[in-house]
Structure formats: structure tokens, C-alpha cells
Amino acid sequence: MGMYDQVTISKEFKLPFTDEQQASLDNHLGGKRTWNRVFQTKDLSCWLDYYLIDPGGKLFELFPDGENKFFDLTGEITLGECISSDCMDTDLWFDLKIKLNKGIVVNTQVVEWMEHDNKNRKTFRAQMDHAREQARERQRRLSWKCYNVLWAIPVDWSLSHVGRLGRWLDKMSMHARRVLLFWN
């Protein structure tokens, strides 16, 4: 794992999907959802930065203050996207390779297109939802509230203060060592 940058591709920018791929994509999105065309990549700064490819194919770096700065890059970047849908039996994963020359897209191609069975993901999500509901139910009980007030909160408070005391003692012992070494 690591930090990914996000690249948003303008809806007006044509992506190189075949008719079959476009039909599969539309199927996974359904009629109700719109696709925001946000991809992840590790081929840029890897500092959770945001980039935009505008309708003309120019690459811009987006900054929090709202400034868009043209990003002059020559090379290739690989963009990945996953579209998961509980209504479908598969999740859609695909990668695009984009070639840039001085910050302008010169070629775009689909390098990987996979439809994965999502039965395991759906099962795991159902198990997590069930466990979350059990935890909420447990927290509503009187026994949990008594445990929390009589044991968990006082013990957490005590341990945090013991930790602070330990750090203070360590700091003071280092200070005492420095003073003794200075006077010797």
C-alpha cells in the first residue's frame, strides 16, 4: 500500500473504450449512478495530490487554494479504477495508460480490463455489517454502560497518567544526567 495521487479526467475527454467495454461499464454504473471519472496512480508525486485532464487533454495539478497549474510532464502514467456494485455479480477493474508530451495527452489505451466475482466482498461486507450491529446492540445494554463507567474510563485515565508520569521522569533523569556531567 502507499499513497496514491488522484487524476480526474474531464467528462468531455474521450476514453478509448470498445463498444463491449462501454456496455459493461454502463451495466456496472446502472442508469442511476454517474461516474465521476476519478482514477488513482502512483506514477506522479505519490503525495495524495490532485490532478485534472481537461477536455483538451492538458494535465493540470490542482491546489487547495483553487489554483490549477499546468503540469509539464513527458512520459507515461498508468491510471487505475474499480467500480463495485452490489447489484452486479462482478466488480469492474481497469487500467488506462496515458502518454503525455509536455503535459498534453498524445495517446490513451486500456491496458487491463477485468471483471472479478464480488461474492467474497459482498459476504465480507455482510459479516462486517452484522458485527457492527452486534457491537451497537452491546453498547446499548446496561452492563456495557456500567463496565464503561466503572472500569474502562478510569483504567484508561490511569494508564494515560502513568504514561505521562513515565515520560516526565525520563525527561527529568536526562536533565539530571546533563547537570551532573556538566559539573564533573
Image (cartoon, rainbow, N blue to C red):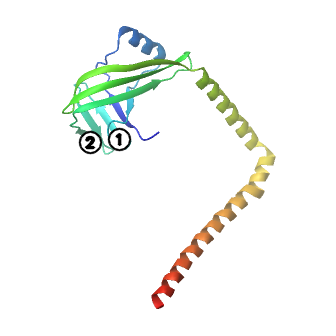
Query: From the viewer's perspective, is residue 153 above or below residue 11?
Result: below
| Numbered badge on residue 67 | 2
Tag in front: 2 or 1: 1
- x and y percent of residue 36 in the render? 39, 26
- x and y percent of residue 108 in the render? 28, 21
Left/right placement of residue 4 relative to residue 72 reads right
Q: Secondary structure at mark 2?
A: loop
Q: Which residue is mark 1?
A: 49
Q: Residue type at mark 2: give it.
A: Glu
To which quarter of the image does residue 133 belong?
top right
To which quarter of the image does residue 94 belong?
top left
Which residue is at a point 33% across and 42% down the rendered structure image?
Answer: 45
Residue furthest toward the top?
A: 19
Count all numbered tags in the image, as a single digit. Answer: 2
Which residue is at a point 26% across and 42% down the rendered structure image?
Answer: 67
Distance CA(mark 2)–CA(mark 1): 13 Å
Left/right placement of residue 108 relative to residue 180 reads left
Q: Secondary structure at mark 1?
A: loop
Q: Residues within 10 Å of mark 2 (few under 14, many from 20)?
A: few
Left/right placement of residue 73 relative to residue 22 reads left
Which residue is at a point 42% across and 10% down the rendered structure image?
Answer: 23
Taking the image as drawn, is residue 12 in sight? no
| Numbered badge on residue 156 | none
Q: Residue type at mark 1: give it.
A: Asp
